[in-house]
Image (tube, rainbow, N blue to C red):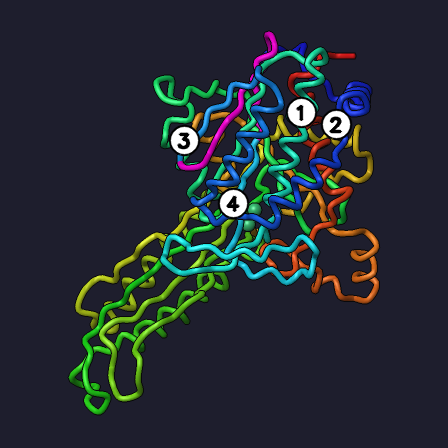
Amino acid sequence: MSETSGATDSALFDSVIKEYRPDLRPYEELYKHCHANGELSTQEKETAALITERLKKLSSDLDVRTSIGGHGQIAILKNGSGPTILLRADIDALPVQEKTGLDYASKKTMLDTDGLTKPVMHACGHDFHITSLLGAAETLIAARSKWSGTIIFLFQPAEERGCGASAMVDDGLYAKDKHACPIPDVVLGQHVFPLKAGQTATRAGSIMSAADSFKITIYGSGGHGSMPHKTIDPVVIASHIVVRLQTIVSREVPPDETAVVTVGALQAGSTENVIADEAVIKINIRSVSTEWRKRILDSVKRIIKAECLAGRSPKDALIEPTSSFPLTVNDEKVVGKINKSFSAYFGDAHDPDAKNVLGSEDFSLLASSIDRPYCFWFFGGHDVEYYDGMVKKGEEHSIPVNHSPFFAPALQPTLTVGVDAMVVAALTYVGKKE
Ligand SMILES: [Zn+2]
Ligand SMILES: [Zn+2]
């Protein structure tokens, strides 16, 4: 990567955005369309087609490659020598029944991969990510005289299930004989977040947690409720497991380390007088360091094994991973540059040392799979007056967060900030010094 390229002062950002950022009203319409027409993870067919169509309309110089790991795609823009950077947006929606009351609220339902018909809502704001990245692409295409290098615009499916980034990588995103995406020097991504609209935030080091989910089947031996001595009751074993799992965070993890172990489901039996022959537990683990991620997973396995042994379970419990999100650990050098740029452009609205978040993302796999550094940041979506009003009333906890059926980010200035943040981050690496 050449040290002479890239800019972190606001002169270039201001002039590029003032001169080349398009009128965003068509993007507001696009946002509303995306919001009303979200698609569930791994089924983002129409969303992907819409993005492809938009990319192709933007410029014939964009090298668009589709159907990567399902409905993923990239658009490569080569513009002279210089660094190669990758800008990422995720595109999937969630099985949530929208309750925002917005005039562009989603009324959509869809058959999910489990065979059930579900409501669909962009409750995580990925519709902002799609429109922001397309708006940034249009800006950067128009501003080609102001930068030099290669930019990859990447649209990723299935983030919510934690399988989209890995599907793209496993499908040969970076493989020379497959999709041959140029290897980026740095990978950049963003997420709309329940901060005030206009604000941006990131931090060096760990910014989002790892999340590991498991389905655990505990085996017993069923029978008549009146003859417990002739059965092995998996309900009792499972109950002990649930209680002892609580001691991982309270007795094993140091108080200054962040971790969560949640038993989200406990299922067994169907009636009073029958002892079930198996029980199922579903657990979700959040951790913010590689060391404690491993230690917590080891503890969970140890506790399950020991309680099954204590309860005379006839065979080992079956532990099946259901989803796994990696840690998101921002590279210090990259964050240093992004912080400098964002503080220059957004001023005090940028928080360079945000709190670690216990949500999870699979974004980092697009960089870690090729051993490249990355930075992920947040941009706020809540109407400022509404947000301040809720804080004043002491009701900050009721402000809807991502995945809530009431999550309704203000269209503006959220969209403008989403576009600007991507443009400023890109110019930080490929911009020509003014
Ligand atoms: Zn989400
Ligand atoms: Zn999300």
- Give yes or no for contact between labels 1 and 2 (Cβ–Cβ under 8 Å): yes
- Where residue 43 sits, quadrant-wise, is top left
Task: Specify the quadrant that holds the C terminus.
Answer: top right
Residue type at the position of mark 3:
Val
Tell me how far mark 3 sits from mark 2, CA to CA. Answer: 32 Å
Q: Position of residue 303 (x, y in %)?
A: 34, 63
Q: What stretch is highlighted in magenta?
A: 70-87
Where disc 1 sits, the SS reads: helix
Mark 4 or mark 2, earlier in chain: 2
Mark 4 or mark 1, earlier in chain: 4
Rate crowding at label 1 as few (under 14), some (14 to 19) or many (20 or more) other CA atoms within 10 Å: many
Residue type at the position of mark 4:
Asp
Kindly identify which residue carries mark 1. Answer: 138
Mark 3 or mark 2, earlier in chain: 2
Q: Position of residue 336 (x, y in %)?
A: 67, 28
Farthest residue, direction top: 81
Query: Would residue 408 appear left or right of 42 to someone viewing this image?
Result: right
Task: Classify 19 as above or below 253.
Answer: above
Q: Nearer the viewer, residue 303 or 284?
A: 284
Task: Classify 114 as above or below 17.
Answer: below
Where disc 2 sits, the SS reads: loop
